[in-house]
Amino acid sequence: MLPRRMLFMLAVIYLLVGCLPISPALQAEDNTQESATENNLLDLIPSEASLSIAIRNLEELTGKGDELIEQTKLELPIRLSVLVDLVFGLIGVRQGSDKSQPIVISALGDSNSFKLLTAIPVADIKLMAANFDITKEQLQSGEIHERDDDDRGNFGLSFIRCKGKHVFLSTTKAILEDATLDASLAKTVSKDDQKTLAADDIVITLGKPALKDPYLIGAVNQTKDSEDELAQLIDDIQYVVSGIRLDSGIGATVIARLKSEDSSQLLGAFFDSEGDATLARMPPGKVLAAHALQADSETTGGLMGLLLDQIRTVITGELNRFSVASESSQLDGLLSEALGRVKGGHLVLYESSNRSRYGDFNLLGVLTTDDPKAFITDLTGLAPFVNAASMNETEAAQAFPPEKINELVAELGNSHYRLRELAKTKLKLLGPRARPALEKATRTGDLESRLAAKALLETLEFEANADRAEFIKGSLFKTLNPDFTYAPEQERLARSDVGILTMQFKSDPQQIGAKMETLFGPEWRTMRIATVDNKVLLLVGSETSLLEQAINNQKLPSSDLANHKACQSFRGRAMKDTLFEFHLAISRLAYLMDLGVGLDKAAANKETDRVSSVGLTINKNQIRVDAYTPLQDIKASVEKGGAIFLP
């Protein structure tokens, strides 16, 4: 579990990002930064605003928005440019504005005392004054004017004041006083963060009143003990700001800046800031899905397990819709033991470079462990226990005699944590066959063994109530009757030994074999396993050059590695020291899995910008999320009317 402080910060970031898979695509050029500084939209945002939305160039943004809508074939009853004119009419500004300059809408106060402030750039001072039935001289005086009741617009913006190149409209007179307008967010936001936002089309900020909102705080399951902690965190936040940009896709960066100098306290010991969470060491190619994380084993295993579960769900769906849940007892037992000892790493699903030769997919993993050799020994040693699920009683009695099961039960009291957990996994995989030995251990073993045996029996009882025999009936395991074997040092790739975990099947329906070969190529029955330093490398698929290049990349110094081409737009803005990254080629994967999405031919063979990406970075007093989604992924989501791969 992540600390509550971290959960709260993620809730804040999610509130700003909303439902868009977004992030700015390109670094701002130096001249862009200079021009932005001359007319800084942050100068127009009160430092105490609860929520503000600032648009750098409304004319340009509406043009981009209309073009994006046209390209994605999104049917709307009204164009964005028309909608903008309608909103301006509603606030009573029908002429004289300059829509090529920053426009800002801010909310101040809280839900009990809600106030609005808008900043409208002036192109023609005389026409602008005519909106409010005052003279040009009156507006230029800089004094506060109150509008007539019939001319206040639909948002109650009753008070007017001209300052600089903008006219400010507000629901209360007090907001237009010098103290409020002069206390701008530009004086609070760091120059580095301002540079990050300099080329973004939209900037959204979240202030203290919004952060204290009970709905946001309710996103974290609070107890009385956590209230003070969250209150301290809110007090520690200087600002939360998000920049959104439209170009060849949609993108955003969300930054939470804290007063304290060490944001790592939010994470506790969960994440490893020394690891590499980018895809720089992964082979280039047609990435379909990728997960990169440096964290403790529980966090890494849990998040990687979610990605593997989604991949398995999709692939199993391709195998004539066999029950996905029915395989969980066997596959998850193996995966949980493996991932439970991974301290970070990468999982990447590639589309094969030659689908007719290698099949559709290759799954490559590069996992960080404390002891790679022990990891492989323990993982491959589970193979016979996974096989037990499809054994008949005679086969099981020969493979797992009572004395062998008793030895496993004795391991429940081993002083080494790794060996205790390994024994638990093996006994879970054995299922009811381990019941007699476990029942005896609850009466005769040491305290550690008795507690572990009791917990395992409760698990077996739960599965018995669910009728384990029917649970695996009709599943892929039951149909194919698999047998896993491991042989070390079977190949040499990149001057490294490669072991092979092989899946043999006592029964192999032709249709399943043919489909699996289509998905993973002629070597779909094998998993190749290699080690480099503290890394374990795994490949499921037939394109072995991916594993070979991955091995080579682990041996290279960081200075020799270029960032992954598939994330070029994302990498142009994201930090290099991300703690977590996730990438998904929504359009391409949806097309390959025949989910009713048309092929985007322009992006079909591109490695660059074919994926939607999100990354988390925490540095000193900054928490930052960067994300990006290309146009073809937006189009795919529109075609399907929403999310595609959500469960």
Image (cartoon, helix red, strand yellow):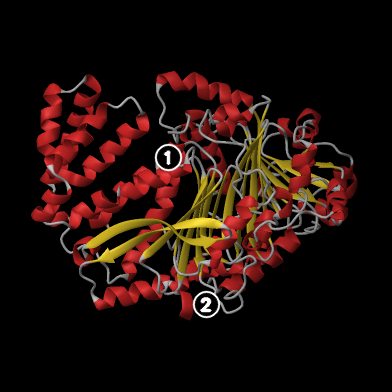
Residue with the mark numbered 1: 341
Q: Quadrant of residue 421?
A: top left
- Left or right: residue 85 versus residue 429 is right
Disc sitting over residue 371 in the figure: none
The C terminus: image quadrant: bottom left
Tell me: residue 469, above or below residue 608.
above
Residue with the mark numbered 2: 354
Question: Where residue 275 sits: x, y (%)?
Answer: 60, 41
At label 1, counting other C-alpha atoms closer than 10 Å, the crowd grade (few under 14, some 14-19, many 20 or more) is many
Residue at horizontal 58%, vertical 45%? 16
- Left or right: residue 202 versus residue 308 is right
The N terminus: image quadrant: top left
Q: Amino acid at mark 1?
A: Arg
At label 2, counting other C-alpha atoms closer than 10 Å, the crowd grade (few under 14, some 14-19, many 20 or more) is few
Q: Nearer the viewer, residue 134 or 605?
A: 605
Q: Disc 2 to disc 1, how far (Cα)?
A: 34 Å
Residue at horizontal 69%, vertical 52%? 202
Label 2: which secondary element: loop
Q: Nearer the viewer, residue 527 or 494?
A: 494
Whether residues under marks 2 and 1 lie with C-beta atoms below 8 angstroms apart, the answer is no
Q: Amino acid at mark 2?
A: Asn
